[in-house]
Amino acid sequence: MLAFSGFNGFGQFAVDGQRSGNAFTGISLEKSMTGEQSILHVAISWSYTAYATEKHLMLSGFLSGTPNSTLSLEISESIVQLAACDRFCLVLCENGKLYKVRTESDAQLQEVKLEAEVQALPQKRNIFGELKSTSAQATRIHITHIACGSNINVAISETNAVYSVPSKIHQLPKHFRVKQLQCGFEHALLLSANGDVYSWGNGFRGQLGHDVLRVEEIPVLIEALAGIKINCIAAGGWHSAAISAFGDLYAWGFNSNGQLGIRMFKPTPSGDFKQPTVFTLPQIVELSECKCLRKKVSVESDDTLEEMGEECVPLRVYAGARHTLLQKNCGAVYATGWNAHGQLGLGRKVEYCDEFEHVDCEENSFRNVRVVCGAWCTVIFKKS
Amino acid sequence: MWRENCGELCKNSKQMEERTEIYKYLPKYKEIKIILENEPEANYILGLAATDVEKANSETYEYNEEVYYLICSLAEKCWERIHTGHFSAVPLEVRKIYALSNYFKIFYLFCESVSQQQLMRCAEVLDEAILIGCTQGLYEGSDEFQSQLTSYISKALEENTQTPLPIIEPLKRQQFKCDILVLDCPSIEDFRTKCFTTEHPALLLNTIKHWPALQKWRDLNYIHKLAGNRTVPIEIGSNYTNDEWSQQLVKIRDFLHRQFTNTDNEIEYLAQHELFDQIPALKADIRIPDYCILRTKDSESPAHVSIKAWLGPKNTISPLHYDPEHNLLCQVFGRKHIILASPADTPNLYAHESEMLCNTSQLDAAQLDFEKFPLAAKATFYNVTLQAGDCLYIPPKWWHYVRAESESFSVSFWWS
C-alpha cells in the first residue's frame, strides 16, 4: 500500500493529470521499477519524490527540466535512508557511505565526501626522539543519520560527529546515542536515545524552542523539554513537534497556518482575537477525544472498563512545510495546518485547520502504516 | 432597456480591450529566460504561462487552469524561499521569479473574474510583487505593466462610494525660534559651502514652493484616488523603541480612514517607505531638489537618491537617532518639531547597545531626564520647527528627534 495526498504539480506521484488531491490516492509504481520488492523508504522534495526498495532507487517527477519523468537506479549496497534536497537526493547506504543523485533523468550515484576530521593527535616519538609513523589518518567516516531542508543538510556519523554536509560542525560526546534526526527549512532537531532534544540552525520563527530568537551554530539542548523523556520528534518548515513518554504532544515555532495545532484566533465576545504567530517555547497541544473505532465500541457497550485499559495517546509525529500529522497508538491519524493543496488528506477542501482533525479512514488499514510528510503533501505506506 | 444593455456590453468590451492592452506588457519568454537559467522549475512553469498568455488575443481563448495552478504554486514556493534565511541572503533571482509569477497570477485572476473583489486582490498581488519580490530591472515592459494595471484597477474601482476623507487645513505660518542656520532658497554653491561640505544643518525656506504636492496632497481623497488600493508597510505604536511597536502591511485606504477620519485609533505611521517607486503617479507631484547633485567625494557617477514618504497623524515620533547619509527633509503639509544634536555629542547621548538599535539614543529628547542620563546635560540640542514648504538639511550622522505637531506629510531625500 502506497498513497499520497497533496501537491502533485510535477507528476511526482505518477497519477496522470491530477495536480493535487484532497484525499489519499493510491500510487501505482511500475513493477519493472520495484521488482517484487516493497518500498522501504520514501523522501519527498517540492518537485520530485524518491522511493527506495532494499537495493533500488527511483526518482519520479521533475527531472532534467521535464515533469512526469522517472529515474531508476540499481544500487549494490542496501539503502538505509533517503533525504530529498531540492537539486539532488541524498542516499545513505548500510556501509555508512553517503551518495547523491542529481535530479536528472540520466543521473548516476556520486559519493559525497565529507571533510575528514582534523585529527590533532599528539605525535608520538620513539626513544631516540624520531617521529613514529602514525597509522593511516584518513579514517573512513561511517554515516548513520541524514536529513535535509532548504538551507541545511545534516549528517551524523557513527562516532557522533555532526556535519553540515560536507563540513564537520560539532562533536557530540562518545556516550551519546542518536535516535532521530530531522530538518526543517533552516533548522535541525536531534533526539537522543535518553529522550533529550537538541536544536540548531535559524531560530527566527521560534523553531528552535529556545526563548531567544537567534541562530545557533551547533546543537543546543532545548531547556524547556529537559527532564521530559521525548520519544519522537518532527521538524516542519519553520516549526517543530515532539511526543513525550507520557503521550503529551509538544509543538513550537511558526503557527502561520495552524501547523502547531493551536488556534490562530481566539473567539471573544467582541470578535475574534488574533493569537501569536510564533511560539518560542514548546507548548502542550490540547487534543480532543480520540475518534478511533476502539472508543466508539466502548461507548456503545456498557462494559467500558476493559476498553479504558489502554488510552489513545500520540505515538508518532510528522511535519511538512506548514502542516503536521499525528499518529496515535490506536492507529488513528490526525492532521493540522496548511491544506491549500490537500496535504492533510481530509478528503475535503479547506484552506487550513488550526486544530488536529481526524483523518477519516479505516483504522485497521492505518495500523502500522508509515507516514512521510513532503513540503506540501503527505505519503502513507505499508510493507505489503 | 435595450439601450442600457448595449451600454453595458460596450463597457464590457471596452474593459476587455483595456485588459488586452495590459497583457501586452507581460514578458515574452525570451525576455525573462536569463533570470530562469538556474531555476528549472520556474523556467518550465513561466515558459508555459508566457506561451499561454500569447494565445489570449484569440476569440476562443480559454485559460489553462493547470498553468494557473502551477503559477500560484511557483509564487507560493518562492514566498517560502524568500522567507527562509536572512532576507539579504535570498538570491535576487528568487525575488524576481516571485514577481514574475505574481504578474502572471494577475493575468489568470483577470481571466477568472473581474469583480470588484478580484480587482482588489489583483492590486494586492501586484504590491506583493513589488514589496516582497523584486521588480527593478525585471524586463523592459515591467514598469509599463504596473502603470497600465494600476490605472485600470483604480478606474474600475472608482465608483466605489466611501465616506470622503478630509482635506487637511493649511496651518497659518508662524515665527518660531530656530537654533540653526536659516537660508532663503540658497544657490547650490551657497548650500555647498555653508552646509554640505561643512556638514552644518540648516533650515531652507522657499525651495520646494513649486511642488504640485503642496496643494494636491492636503486633499487626502487625491492620495486615496491614486493609491487607495495599494499596500504599504505601516508602523504601529508611537515610537519604534517601544515593545508594543510593530510593523504591518496595510492598504493605504484603510490607513487613511483609520488615522484621518477618526482619532480614537492607535497611532499608525507610514514611515521610511519608498512610496514613490511603488506609485510613480505620486512622484510626479514632487521634484528631487537640485542640492542632491552634490557629492562628498569627487566621484563622477550620479549617486542614487532614495526618496521616502512619512505620512501620519499628529504625535508620531521618531526617537533621537542618526542616519549615515545626507538628508533633506521636506515638509508637504503639517508641522514637525525637530531636535538636533551634533555627532560630536555622540558620547553624551546614550545610544542603545543592541546591534539593531545602535544608531538610536535611549534619551527622550523632548523631556530629558538628567538624573538617569547625566551626560546629556553636556550635550547641545538645537530646536527647529519645520512648516509646510520648508526643508531641513540634516548632515550625515547628525542626531535627530522628530515629532509631528499636526497631521503631517514629509518627503525625505537621502543621498551620499
Image (cartoon, coloured by chain):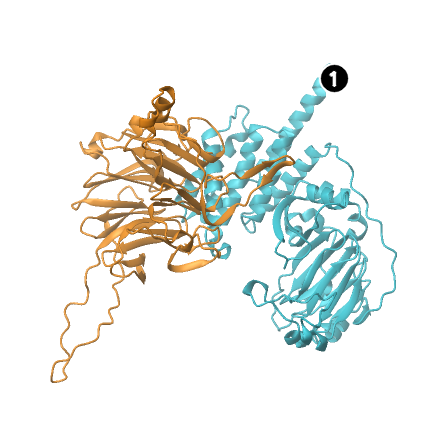
Chain colours: A orange, B cyan
At mark 1, the secondary structure is helix
B316 in relation to B157, above or below: below
The chain ID associated with circle 1 is B
In the rendered image, is residue B248 in sight? yes
**Image coordinates for residue A184, horizontal then vertical, percent:** 39, 48
Q: Position of residue A340 (x, y in %)?
A: 47, 34
Q: Nearer the viewer, residue A159 or B182?
A: A159
Residue located at (51% from left, 34% from top): B54
The answer to whether residue B141 is seen in the rendering is: no
Find the residue positioned furthest to the bottom. A128
- Occupied quadrant, residue A332: top left
In this figure, which residue is indicated by the disc labeled 1?
A: B3
Q: Nearer the viewer, residue B346 or B116?
A: B346
Number of other residues with Cα within 10 Å of mark 1, as a class: few under 14, some 14 to 19, many 20 or more: few
Check the picture and name the quadrant holding the C terminus of chain B: bottom right
Among all residues in the image, which is located at the extreme left?
Answer: A127
Q: Could you tell me residue B215's position as x and y percent?
A: 81, 50
Q: Name the quadrant of the N terminus of chain B.
A: top right
Q: Is residue B128 above or below residue A299?
A: below
At x 35%, y 25%, the residue is: A304
Along the viewing direction, whichever of B415 and A296 lies nearer the viewer: A296
Using residue B120 as the reference point, say whether residue B213 is left or right of it. right
- The residue at the point 48 percent across, 29 percent down is B64
Q: Is residue B38 left or right of residue B214?
A: left
Residue B365 drawn above or below residue A27? below
Q: Where is residue B191 shown, x and y percent of the image?
A: 75, 71
What amino acid type should be assigned to the residue bearing mark 1?
Answer: Arg
